[in-house]
Amino acid sequence: MSSERLRVALFGSGRIGHVHAHNIAGHPDLDLAVIADPFLDGASRLAASTGTTAVASTEEALDTPGLDAVVIGSATSTHVELIEAAVQRGLAVVCEKPIDLDLATVRSCRERIAGSRTPIMLGFNRRFDPAFAAVRRRVEAGEIGTLEQLTIISRDPQPAPVGYLASSGGIFRDMTIHDLDMARFFVPDIVEVSAQGSTLFSDDIRDLGDYDTAVVTLRGARGELVTITNSRHCAFGYDQRLEAFGSAGMLSAANLAADTVRFYSASGTEQAGPYLPFFLERYQAAYRAELDAFAAAVRTGTAPSPGFDDGMAALVLAEAATESAAAGKAVNVEGSW
Amino acid sequence: MSSERLRVALFGSGRIGHVHAHNIAGHPDLDLAVIADPFLDGASRLAASTGTTAVASTEEALDTPGLDAVVIGSATSTHVELIEAAVQRGLAVVCEKPIDLDLATVRSCRERIAGSRTPIMLGFNRRFDPAFAAVRRRVEAGEIGTLEQLTIISRDPQPAPVGYLASSGGIFRDMTIHDLDMARFFVPDIVEVSAQGSTLFSDDIRDLGDYDTAVVTLRGARGELVTITNSRHCAFGYDQRLEAFGSAGMLSAANLAADTVRFYSASGTEQAGPYLPFFLERYQAAYRAELDAFAAAVRTGTAPSPGFDDGMAALVLAEAATESAAAGKAVNVEGSW
Amino acid sequence: MSSERLRVALFGSGRIGHVHAHNIAGHPDLDLAVIADPFLDGASRLAASTGTTAVASTEEALDTPGLDAVVIGSATSTHVELIEAAVQRGLAVVCEKPIDLDLATVRSCRERIAGSRTPIMLGFNRRFDPAFAAVRRRVEAGEIGTLEQLTIISRDPQPAPVGYLASSGGIFRDMTIHDLDMARFFVPDIVEVSAQGSTLFSDDIRDLGDYDTAVVTLRGARGELVTITNSRHCAFGYDQRLEAFGSAGMLSAANLAADTVRFYSASGTEQAGPYLPFFLERYQAAYRAELDAFAAAVRTGTAPSPGFDDGMAALVLAEAATESAAAGKAVNVEGSW
Amino acid sequence: MSSERLRVALFGSGRIGHVHAHNIAGHPDLDLAVIADPFLDGASRLAASTGTTAVASTEEALDTPGLDAVVIGSATSTHVELIEAAVQRGLAVVCEKPIDLDLATVRSCRERIAGSRTPIMLGFNRRFDPAFAAVRRRVEAGEIGTLEQLTIISRDPQPAPVGYLASSGGIFRDMTIHDLDMARFFVPDIVEVSAQGSTLFSDDIRDLGDYDTAVVTLRGARGELVTITNSRHCAFGYDQRLEAFGSAGMLSAANLAADTVRFYSASGTEQAGPYLPFFLERYQAAYRAELDAFAAAVRTGTAPSPGFDDGMAALVLAEAATESAAAGKAVNVEGSW
């Protein structure tokens, strides 16, 4: 059976690399051929626990015999180079977001890989969350009539380390980008972006000239209004919710706790546990479903979704949000793709 | 308009008397003519705050000119006498449960008032709770197919004073009787009663030879099974819930908090407030709807429901539960009405 | 006791007039002295059902002997004149929102009544909703740490008649104004307004050059971000929710259904009923509590809250939102009060 | 690493065999050495999909070289024989419930294996459900004070095929036995059993002289009261809930839907999806956690829990329930273990 599996090279053995490594290793249609990371120690430990081998060299990984695909979970700065190298070799690609922090770089990459039919999937994992995916499916099925408003609430449990934040491109490119893609999952054609940022609790983030709190409003081509509410901290866990409001009703997706237990006492009732702490737990099923979709797309020869252009579109929106927040005006993004 | 209102004499100015006094005084179809209580001081204060007069004498109250109805909220030991006096005078009756703690006394009363067409309503207020009434209405409408199981959970916030408990007739006659009537609201024809009692937390109740915790299972004529779970205390408020399970679905009614506010913090999420503390708050709407139903029944000349026989039936079941708990066996109640 | 009650003249016998009339008539501290409306027929019917008299003339109503206060529920165009007339006579005022659709008119009124110590309360009823008030109280008590974000979702069940909408001043002045006041209930000092409007379902509203769908983002002086999501229709009832997010947690207030019943069947589980249809039902308790607060303020000689300046501030924000939506840029409102 | 894993033989390749086969095959500490089933076809297919081999012969399976443990998921009639054979060989055992339908047979088996230190775990999977386990852990931690009442609601989606039911031993031995063990998970020392059965919807079950609907009340040694509500059908999915009520509060565990999506429309609000259909889905995590606990117990040389005696105790309670339902009286089970 092994000969029928897609042989995959994984780039990056950090937090997201771990998720992918275990999911690939346990996937019936995928074979984890190699893990590549210049920090070989971590890669080797991860390789040992997933029954594969580790290498430090990108070239060596790409030259692994019989390779079918690459999963790129390495530093953002390596994404474009790896995508292009994979495309040259005809290897299917899953690339974590963002493609790059610089839109011009992304556009150049896009030109260089234009014409290639290599399948490229962008790692917007949230599209594969069972609840968000179900809301999308039911909206498409017409359960709420015409979609009019989308409300996305997305708060991280706490800010990333300041070192990471310094090179993150700012809240819109680093954090909101997931929500911008979620907006496009429901309203692909966005025409206008308005954003407000604020720094309410983190001196580190203020020192970086970045925001720890933000609101983005998007207008779709049909006039749909999408609201994104972000915070870089959240006392009660990872806050990831969504409401799709339409002419005939509404569909909502809620947060997840570890279990369904509720507590009742003199000080309150129906208390659920804290929400799952962060993306590794909250989107566990989503990361698996993402690989399922990738494997299925490669097998059937259909274009994976979300694709490269979705990655670029989210970045366009993130840039527009950055600009809007600074300038205090709405930014038109028609024709920016 | 006053001439068209039903003129009502209220017996009793205790806790339940207060509820009825204010509800009658504020009711568009009722006129609170007099409040009678041998403890004249309390009655006078209540009368002052509801714009009526107080008397100590039962006879005097019954002889109030133009009287149409009596609401009996006095001590249980006075119920039978007051019912009979009212019936003799042709006054419509609302009587708090129980009719009497002694079934033989109730049966005698029933014989004495037999043939009278005076409307008598038993104060099983919970039948008028908006949620329980809605469940009943929807069960009747067939939403859950055939009713198969009824689950009633009913817990008081804390035990009544030991002085009250000593003359209460025991948990089944005093507390469970409401749940037994609720069972009959859904399954009027009960054929068998099984009960278990336990004393887990109250030495006072143990000393009285009574139970502070109980479970009753009832079998309906079609085989329906009803479960009643009781406790004389509840840390998180007045616990009053119900589930009607049928061949095609289930309908449930939940507890009430003061508002819909939920709290989310590092120690838990979705925490609602404590439930409403006790019957005065929980069944506020029910007490008003009960008077609505009474006024409407008297006006239209239809028999009020629940009526005298429902009061007797609940007592029959309470006696059977008392016997079953003591004897450790199911008690058949067919033909006991 | 009647001599101690505040004697109130009610202006307007329309929908909101009915609410106030019944609440005043049933209020222990208020006495409904007269109802004034040029459409005397409706006023007379309402007066008959609340035990008072009706007049067509404003003057006549204001000259009612022993009058203490006026409740203004008449057409918006009459508000300023009535406020000023009441202030001249030293009558306490409750005035429905908005004071006027024209900010200059409001400012002039304010100048004319400056120096008066007559209590004036603005009818922002939602501040008195038990759930919203509880969230506010608990935020003030520090339960969520420092308030950082406020999310208000507010959707009417369906648009008002086009005749009404034509003179409503547009969605921001007519509908959002309640949410703008709710924002100020939590974040009194707003410095910037950004708004987006869209017309998605109503041709009438489009023809009026108005929006049926809107989003407003407000920035508080400390950087707090408030989001308001509006729609002029909502398939599942009156959608009125709020979340206050802070550094240590979150408090939310939810919609209300008629009862707590939940339905479980093969096609879904835990289904609650539709939400209460509109403001008369949803804010029933709020309207009563508003009068309580008014009566208490007048009695104790404290300034009622919300007051005239709150009414003006909400209008300033509504104008800024109107301007922002048209211009596609944030509008600074510092120093606009 | 393989040499450190426990080598496991699986008996039975039916529905529950499939669950165990995949869980063992994917478990880091277990190695699925062989699958044994006289119906070799099914076993072979299951073996192929889990990367192991299938045999028809029990002996052959037990003689697999290097075997450490057996998982018994074959027909109930084979359980005792397989347990004894495994014990003789010193193989650790996981055995599905019930040990046998006949209590005398179980007692004999117990005598024959007495003295052996072979670890035996009974497959009461629900003890490992994350929510039920969390409630138990929090009860033990004292969150609700002293446990007083336990309410278990347990309904299958639809009856098993009549052929299965005919040899199932009746609802108490076949279905309620899981709930009886859950009762003992919280209240190990049960002293009295009362049961009522009814046949409300299944002619097949009536023809078998069995019940399709049942209620069981258990009394613990400290007077705790446990209520179990069963039905052989449930329109809205697999209904598996529990409430632990104590002197200081309550903990509840709810049903599971496929996702957190809620639907709001003109016909109702907050509608969740149907509950997970049956045990394979509902207890997916529980089956995995059960194997974790087994592997950990074997590794650390501690006795697995629940053990053989828990299996026997549940059967004692099931027999007592059967007797109680038939006789209409409580059955004392003190000293029956």
Image: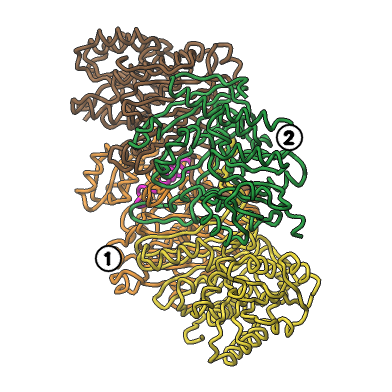
Chain colours: A orange, B green, C yellow, D brown
Residue for badge 1: A162
Label 2: element kind: loop
What amino acid type should be assigned to the residue bearing mark 1?
A: Val
Report x, y in % for residue A227.
51, 64
Q: Nearer the viewer, residue A116 or B171?
A: B171
On screen, A264 above or below D231?
Answer: below
Whether residue B158 is visible to the viewer of this picture, yes or no, is: yes
Count of numbered marks: 2
Q: Residue C268's x, y, as percent?
A: 57, 40
Residue C224 spot, x, y in % from top left? 42, 72
Q: Main secondary structure of the magenta part?
A: helix
Q: Which residue is mark 2?
A: B116
Q: Mark 2: give few (<14), some (14-19) or many (20+) Cα within 10 Å.
A: few
| Distance of label 2 from label 1 (alpha carbons) | 86 Å
> Which residue shows up at 25% across the image and 39% down it?
A49
**Start-end of magenta stretch:** A277-297
Q: Which chain is home to disc 2?
A: B
Question: In the image, what residue occupies the spot 48% across and 15% down?
Answer: D170
Q: Quadrant of residue A210?
A: bottom left
Mark yes or no: residue A251 visible: no
